[in-house]
Amino acid sequence: IQAYRQTFSSGIVMSGPTVVTEVLQTAATFAISSQEAAMAEGKQKYTTLLILTDGAVSDVAATVRCINEIKNAPLSIVIVGIGSADFSDMQFLDDQSSNIDIAQFVEFNKHKHDSASLINATLEEIPTQLVNYFQRQGIMPNPPVQMEEADIVVEAEEEEIHVTIDFGADGNTMSVPSGGIYIPPGAY
């Protein structure tokens, strides 16, 4: 939530319509390819997509169709509604007629003063969704892995690249941070 708040303190403004179908399809494709790659190595992988939104989805029917199309992916979808919007239309995520449930909606304001309640509501359905996915696919759990704390390796995060470009009054002169690349006007 802190990252969400920091994003908006930068001056970005959210606006409608709220369309998530492409994000859902991309996440499902990623989840499937990740699981296939893991299986090739004798491992298992399951993906959880968390979407934070300040508004209800604009096209409920398209979102339901999309979720039904991707319901066999190794994927759980949690959408958290943040802010004062009317999220009553989001109940469809928990009321789907499909026998395969991969999505849920959590209204942040109902839990904003109780972080344990927010965590519980957000994570509540994921264990069942994960188990159901692997059972539907006939995939048995891998044996438990015994590890010592010293064996756990935390990989370095990818370095973020910050680019600042200043245009002069003539519209052509640019200053680029040291190590940056200057692309002259007309070359792009």
Image (cartoon, rainbow, N blue to C red):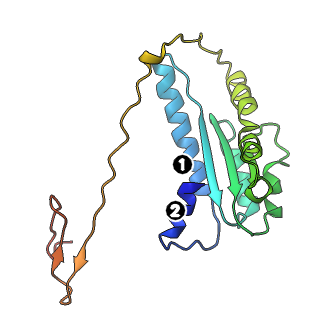
Quadrant housing residue 55:
bottom right
Mark with earlier residue (1, 2): 2
Disc 1 from disc 2: Cα separation: 25 Å
Left or right: 145 as drawn, with respect to 184 = right
- Identify the amino acid type marked 1: Thr
Left or right: 91 as drawn, with respect to 143 = right
Q: Which of the pair 146/91 is nearer the observer?
A: 146
Q: Which of the pair 2/165 is nearer the observer?
A: 2
Judged from this view, the residue extending furthest toward the front is 113
Above/below status of 82 relative to 121: below
Q: Residues within 10 Å of mark 2 (few under 14, many from 20)?
A: few
Q: Residue at x 74, y 42 (%)?
A: 116
Numbered circle sitting on residue 26: 1
Q: Label 2 belongs to which residue?
A: 6
Q: Which of the pair 8/17 is nearer the observer?
A: 8
Q: Position of residue 40 (x, y in %)?
A: 47, 20
- Identify the amino acid type marked 2: Gln
Above/below status of 128 relative to 15: above
For the N terminus, which image quadrant? Answer: bottom right
Q: Position of residue 81 (x, y in %)?
A: 71, 59
Q: Position of residue 134 (x, y in %)?
A: 67, 24
Above/below status of 73 relative to 65: above
Q: Residue at x 34, y 52 (%)?
A: 160
